[in-house]
Amino acid sequence: MRQPVFVFLSFEGPDRYSRVGGLATRVTGLVRELAARGYETHLFFIGDPYLPGHEVLNGGNLHLHRWCQWISEHHPGGAYDGEAGKLQDWNRSLPAWLLGNLFPEVINSSRNLVVIGEEWQTADVLVTLDAAIRHAGWQDQTRLVWNANNTYGFERIDWTGLLQAAVLTTVSRYMKYVMQRHGLPARAIPNGMEERWLAPLPPGSTQPLEKALKNRLAITKVARWDPEKRWDYAVDTVSVMKGAAMAPVLIARGGAAERAGDVLARIESHGLQLARVSWEGQDVRSLTAALLPALGADVVLLDSMLFEDQSKLLYRVSDAVLANSSIEPFGLVGLEAMAAGGIAVVGSTGEDYVTNGYDAISLQGDDVWEFIRYIARIKHYPGAERNMRIEARKSAARFTWRAVIERALFPFVREMGLVVDEPDTPQVIKQLRR
């Protein structure tokens, strides 16, 4: 029997139009890694209406299928703009296309299928596929999986049908226990990140900001403006630290500027000095040039999109990366910050990759002084900060997509009765494990 074909269903995906949150980061990294390992991988998602409907990448292994494009043309706001109409078309047309095209091609070539649906929008498709698979007698060659990244939309799912159709997974032990309280058995398979996050920045690229921030305590926060992301905590912390003469500066990226109203009001209420910066370009020099004139402020809002190396730069030069959501199913920002050698400050829900005080900081409550005491302690003891940054990168290396696939996803697929190969561990991971 040849290697299985992986099929992912997700509203979010790699297009800028489809990148809304952590789900896009998850599926993009996962499908790229599977394709890079030689597995035929298909991602069906709500893609950019002006890009090809079917795009083949990675030597023919990665297939991007942009769905509902005819609807997206009239909804420029992204994957969830016009969600009701897209969902109706998705539920009607996607199962029909899969059952009439991809599935017969794979089954007739004596290959197996692993179909993984992400989030509540894919549940009805899996139920429909399950009924058709049983009718066609394809059960031995197909495995249906449904993954929960959070509890959004749980009230809209036909759980009886989904539990019959698919095996349930989720992204952390915390989410596994949340689902258990709903009476839903799930296997915890953690999120991952792409190995590029472990690659160092170009030599000397951090020095200008490190020099400019030498006498400041820099805190970076990158998250949606949603209240659950604890922007109130971040602003309050900066206010208290300023009052304690700790010279803080909060470097903040929260998304669309028009959604920042509550955060801006809180900054103003504390009397904090605000600066806003924007730039063009994806390189670290563009961001550095925009930031340097603004670092005299208490809070610097970044109005342009952060690209990967720019995020790595901020995580690396900051004294702390504040990623303590009130409820976090997994926490990709914290993991990426650790990979970049940053001091990640997370909450205490789904961040399974953290060992508190060893490779990151895990806050237990709402007291801003808890955070301040941790940072003061790290700064006080010689070598503590350096050691935490080193251990952070080592811990993050255990959560690259390659590592997660080897440790969790492929064993899960084997338990479902399918055959997958064991790959070699890449050199970059071996070095970090020493």
Image: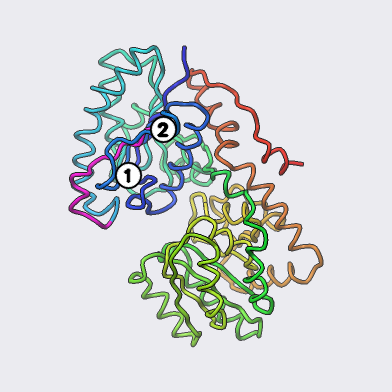
Residue 381 location in percent, x, y?
A: 80, 68
- Residue flagged by tag 1: what amino acid is it? Phe
Say which mark, if any, is on residue 62.
2
Along the line of sight, the residue nearer the viewer: 45 or 92 = 45
User: Which of the 4 image quarters holds residue 247?
Assistant: bottom right
Which of pointers 2 and 1 indicates the residue nearer the eye? 2
Judging by the rendered image, the residue that carries numbered circle 1 is 11
Answer with mark 2 or mark 1, whichever residue precedes in sequence: 1
Q: Is residue 143 left or right of residue 69?
A: right
Instruction: Identify the residue at image location x=60%, y=24%.
Output: 422
Along the line of sight, the residue nearer the viewer: 156 or 225 = 225
Mark 2–mark 1 distance (CA, rounded to whole Å): 17 Å
Residue 130 location in percent, x, y?
A: 30, 24
Say which mark, if any, is on residue 156.
none
**Which secondary structure, mark 1?**
loop
Q: Which residues are magenta?
A: 62-77
Q: Is residue 115 left or right of residue 425?
A: left
Instruction: Identify the residue at image location x=46%, y=44%.
Output: 26
- Whether the magenta-drawn stretch holds residue 400 is answered as no
| Outermost residue to the right | 382
Q: Is residue 87 left or right of residue 397?
A: left
Instruction: Identify the residue at image location x=54%, y=82%.
Output: 297
